[in-house]
Image (tube, grey):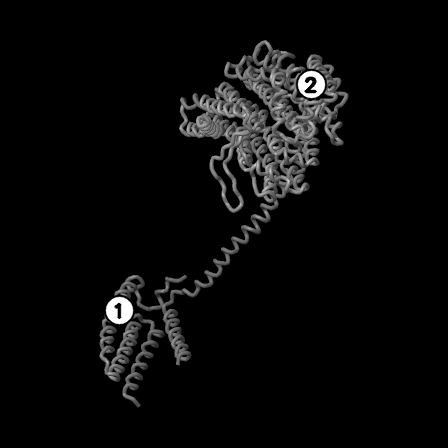
Amino acid sequence: MDHKVVLVGGASAVIQKVSLFFIPIMPLIGAIFLGLCVFYRNELNEKFSGFLATTAALCSFILAATCFNEILAGETAVGFTAWQWIKSAGLNVDFGLKMDRLSGVMTLVVTGIGTLIHFYSIGYMEHDENRSKFFCYLNLFLFSMLLLVLGDNLIMTFVGWEGVGLCSYLLIGFWYKEMPNAIAGQKAFVVNRIGDAGFLLGIFIIFTFLGTFNYSEIASLINKMPTTVIEVVALLLFVGAAGKSAQIPLYVWLPDAMAGPTPVSALIHAATMVTAGIYMICRLSFMYALAPNALQVVALIGALTAFFAATIATSQFDIKKVLAYSTVSQLGYMFLALGVGAFSNAIFHVVTHAFFKACLFMGAGSVIAGCHHEQDMRKYGGLWKKMPVTFATYIAATYAIAGMPWASGFFSKDQILWATYSANFPLAKFLWLLSVVTAFLTAFYMTRSLFMTFFTGPYRGEHEAHESPMTMTIPLVLLAIPSLVFGYLHGENLMHFLADWTRSDLKGGHHALMHKPMYHELEMLSIFIACSGVTLGGLHCMFPALSKAFNNLFPTLHKAFINKWWVDEIYFALIVNPLRSISAVLFKFADRILIDGSVNSLADLTKLLSSSMSRAQSGIIGAYSHVLMFGLVGFIMVWVIFNG
Amino acid sequence: MDVTSFYLLLSITLFSIGAFGVLIRKNAIIIFMCIELMLNAANIAFVALSRQYGDLNSQVAVFFVMAVAAAEAAVGLAIILAVFRHYRTIEADQACELRG
């Protein structure tokens, strides 16, 4: 009896490990095959690339669900070390994967939404001539993201981190033949890299003090690091997270990243890549719990970013830009949650945000495709009749993001607001106020985008608008449903599930979930804020005279919002242009004159020497015979004198 | 004075005349004659010392030197002929194009 159980246990463990290993490897295999499709391009390959990619993503999802099942059934984690990657004196890094509660949830989100977006892209990229390249990049992205999330040590996470940065660059600049797209891709990569510098420094410091990269080993050894060092490391890692997850001051790449195809924006810049920073901080929550000052910085920057981006989103006319700034704002909420110690709240918001933001982006993509690539909302109008399914899902997702009652956005945002309110540090109430105003602004600008797109004004586009094909609308529906009901059905379960894993939540989290002072009052306030935001958004669109009057009241503010607070211009003036001038000077002086000059003068010296020496070869035979004779005589004389 | 010394003195004299000739003369054939003179001076030195020590090996060396001199004269005269065909003169100073 016992014997049988052990055997079965052994077999199922192997199946678990193999499934775990193939979760990131399936998209890698897909990417390799699609890479071959790109090289040997023909009609057949192009048609099937989409299906191949989606199948790979779907397999990943199924395997992830299998492993996650084990975790739901009671295991703490499923781990698998594939091979020993780096082994040198004292520096050991394994290709190790581990799925525990946190990475399980993230993996399901990544693979599930990834699959839906792959499926959506089949429809969206139907007329593009580089489809197979697109799907190859998408699969490569999934592979990197899964490495990031499932890696059991900092180096694996960093490999995935860089990989998603690369894929983001490739995908943003996918239509690189237009210069602005290529520039946007480069901007994303460069800004990301700045964050990566901080991330790497943090990793180096951890390794110097603890000698390991593995998360569980770091967790057990963390107390050996002095507190100041932990604070510094936490801040450095946060710099990395700010770069990847678009917080102040490194958020500037995200709005420009909208130059990429819409499925890219949906997958990378809404649901998965930008949440990598939050995942990383949650992974190292035990370290952040010991660094309260760093957490305060995180919370402050998160709240400021949320507010700041929301103000910009209220005045944008490009539908994708509104959603981009909305993403930055919601990511700010997640960092705010992390900063007040409510790690499981942040992940809850990650999940709900993934649902409704991906749905919104895909809906926007559907609108854009249906209106023949028109992105300016001022040209939209009356589309609710022409695109019913898109309209229904968009309004559902807007309802969720605005925090309207009983949608998932309501639950997750509310948890964060409440956690901020009851947090223990001095700025908490101010940050709470900021986040409440941001919630109002979120409801406002989302309703504005909804009305401008689907209701107000005659349709002023160039071509007739039409509804999108089934491949695009099915994922919309599949995402709209959880946007509405996930929070209600599974919100509490998810938070408990995650809180049991994060042993050291500060204020929000397990204990605080139990007793919630002021919770109902804050809930009422949130509902009021959301409803007023929606109402004002609707009024703003239905009565343009009202909004014009409002704009004239605060002209500078209005200009600031439209011009994105001139942040890009400031960066150009303060950082980019000085760097370019310094680089020009260095090129003209240090490179050309100093370095090239020294190398060239060495060559000139050689030429000088050789030309002076070659004068000895005169070609005159008499001279040669003279030298011969006298040299011989002299040599013999010397020899005789010195050797007797 | 030793008999051998006289022969060696003769050898030295002939050698210096030959060396002097190589350095001074312009005509290539005369230079060759002087080279032959130097070689024969060496031959005399060989024979003298062979007579002194009663060792016949040096006389074998004389044969070698003579054979080498003959071969070298053949090759050298062929080169002078080729140079003459190109420059129409055999003055050594005229063939100075191989310069650096």
Q: Amino acid at mark 2?
A: Phe
Query: Residue A580: image x %, image y %?
Result: 62, 40
Q: Is residue A237 left or right of residue A36?
A: right
Q: Chain of mark 1?
A: B
Give the quadrant of residue A102: top right
Instruction: Tell which of A97 and A155 is nearer to you.
Output: A97
1 vs 2, front mark: 2
At 75% across and 17% down in the image, what residue appears? A549
At 68% across and 18% down in the image, what residue appears? A443
As drawn, the residue found furthest toward the right would be A553
> Label 1's element?
helix
Give the quadrant of residue A207: top right
Query: Residue B12: image x %, image y %?
Result: 32, 81
Q: How dense is the environment of label 2, judged by Cα within 10 Å: few (below 14), some, or many (20 and up)?
A: many
Q: How dense is the environment of label 1, judged by Cα within 10 Å: few (below 14), some, or many (20 and up)?
A: some
Q: Is residue B100 left or right of residue A201?
A: left
The residue pinned by badge 2 equals A444
As drawn, the residue found furthest toward the top would be A385
At 56% across and 41% down in the image, what residue appears? A212
Query: Residue A9: image x %, image y %?
Result: 47, 27
The residue pinned by badge 1 equals B72
- Residues at marks 1 and 2, CA–CA distance in whole angstroms: 109 Å
Query: Is any part of residue A26 visible from this angle?
Result: no
Quadrant including the N terminus of chain A: top left
Q: Amino acid at mark 1?
A: Glu
